[in-house]
Structure formats: C-alpha cells, structure tokens
Amino acid sequence: MKKVALVIDNSGSLTPEEMEKIHVTKMIPISFIVNGEEYYENVNMSYEEFYKFLADKKTDVSTSQPSIEMIKEEWRNILKEYDEIVYIILSSGLSESCNTAINASHTDEFEGKVFVVNNQRVAYMNKMAMYEARYMIDHGKTGKEIKEYLEKTKSECGVYIAVDTLRYLKKGGRVTPAAAAIGTLLNIKPILQIHGGKLDAFAKVMSMKQARAKMINATRKEIEERFPDEAKQGKVYIGMAHSNPDLNAQELKDFKEEVLKAFPDLPFFTFDPLPLFIVCHTGPNAMAIGYCVDRMGIIKDMIKSE
C-alpha cells in the first residue's frame, strides 16, 4: 500500500487541533498583504492583530499567490518520506494558484506523485473534503482515487455569504466604485453565493438581519431541491463561517441559534472564522451559511470526539 501524504492550505480554516486529528502532513498557508508587508495567519499576525489593522480605514489589505517554487520544494521534501501527495487547496474559481499547482504537478518530476485536488471549495466546504481525504487515505485509497472522488463530488455543496460593507468588494473589482458609493449610502448588504467555486451575486438586502434570514431560506430551498434523500439520511451537514472580530459577539450567537432552529433535523458541522486572506475580500462582519453532502457517511464518526 502506498504511503500518501495529506497536504493542505489554510482555505479550510482547520484549527491546529483539527490538523492533528486528521494527521495533516503539511499546511502551506496563503499569505496576505497589509500595508505592503506580507503576513501569514497565526504565524506572524494573529486574528486580533489583523482586525485592529482593518479597523483603520487607511489600512491597505490584499492577497498574493504562494510561490510555486516554494510549493515544489515542499513537495520534494515530503516525497522523501511519502510515495504520493494529495494537495487540497483553495478553489480554482477564487485563485489562480490552484491551476498553477495543477500545472506543476503534471511536470515530469511530479507526475503520478502529486495530486492537486480542484474541488472548487473554500472554508468549511473544503474542511469536509480534507476530512474525507484523511478517511480515504486511512482506508488504502491512492492519491489518484482520492482526487477523482473529491472532484466528482465537488458540486455537492453550496454557500451564501453576506458582507457588511462594499468597500472590500470594490477594491477587489467585484463592484464598481459608483455602485459601491450608492450601496454604502443606502446601507445595502449584498449576499453572495459560491457554487462551482466562483463568487457570484445572489441578492441585496437592507440589513444583516434580513441577510441572515434570506441566506437560511436559500440554503433550505437548495437542500430540499437538490438533496432531499441525502437530507433524510442525515448526510447533509450545515456549516457556518464569519469574519467578526469579536468571536463572542451576540450577533454570532443569534445567527447560530437561528440556523439550528431552521435545520433541527440536519447535523451541524462547524462555525469557523473565515481565513484572513478571505477577509481581505469580504471585510469584517461578514456571515456565511452553507451545506455539504457527506456522501460516504463518515463525518459524524470523525468529529464525534471533538
């Protein structure tokens, strides 16, 4: 049986405890730029420090792709001890770094040894894929088999995210300056959706409370239409994420309570802070809800001890 390494980036918001639990071989984080300086989440900038910077409207934040040469060097080191690498990273619809890594994996040096998973996921959706990959590794699956499964099931999920400000979407080119100015004046809260890895507009509302209700209803409708049988079998998991600088904020508690009340029969997966490189695009106080199908029915046993 081949020895397969599980390598990830930080798009799945795994905690150190979760990475240890699923035996992540290596986490290669995505960096972000603050006022021209490069940082890595919880390496040289903490969650709290980042939001202090973000509170200053003069702070300039952006993201950058990991160096492919650095990634290839990590692969070389890992392949000294492992036969294959399964590399699960941010959706190709949100970053070019995925396609860059895929191209590198098909060079003579890494062909048949490195399997870059383009499952077009982010946040808790990618976390579930990482859990699934560990289960498959432990049950003797090859890198090729794991990549094929995760890409085959990539669309069995969806997420809705409401942002509190249009400032960061404007900076990233998601909305025009004129639209951002009007939206800010009217206090519009846009709701975005991620399906197939791309971030698209879904709706506009006038408050975050309205946004939460609309996202819950959209999630319920989508599950009922796409995966009614899987939901009855307890294989559809609800996940949540946020970019609130206060991890104990009352609005987060209210949101979770609303979600648990709306989906009493569906298992709950996780409620995570969004990765800071994602917050560079959403801004603070964003909230997200979505779902993932646990096709193999293994997540419950993997998280029950957490």
Image: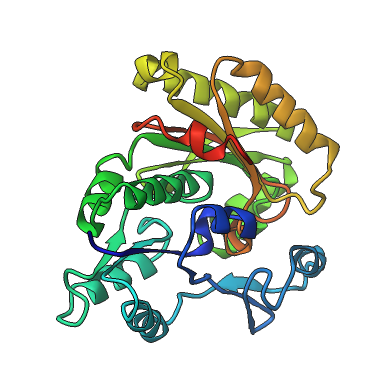
Tell me if I can see residue 9 in this picture. yes
The x and y percentages for residue 243 are 69, 51
Q: Is residue 181 left or right of residue 86?
A: right
- Whether 60 is drawn above or below 235: the answer is below
The residue drawn where x is 43% and y is 13% is 232
The residue lying toward the viewer, choosing from 43 and 255, is 43
- Whether 289 is drawn above or below 19: the answer is above
Q: Quadrant of residue 277?
A: bottom right
Q: Is residue 22 left or right of residue 155?
A: right
Q: Is residue 91 left or right of residue 242?
A: left
Q: Quadrant of residue 69?
A: bottom left
The residue drawn where x is 53% and y is 62% is 10
- Whether 210 is drawn above or below 107: the answer is above
Tell me if I can see residue 288 in this picture. no
The x and y percentages for residue 8 are 44, 63
The residue lying toward the viewer, choosing from 82 and 73, is 82
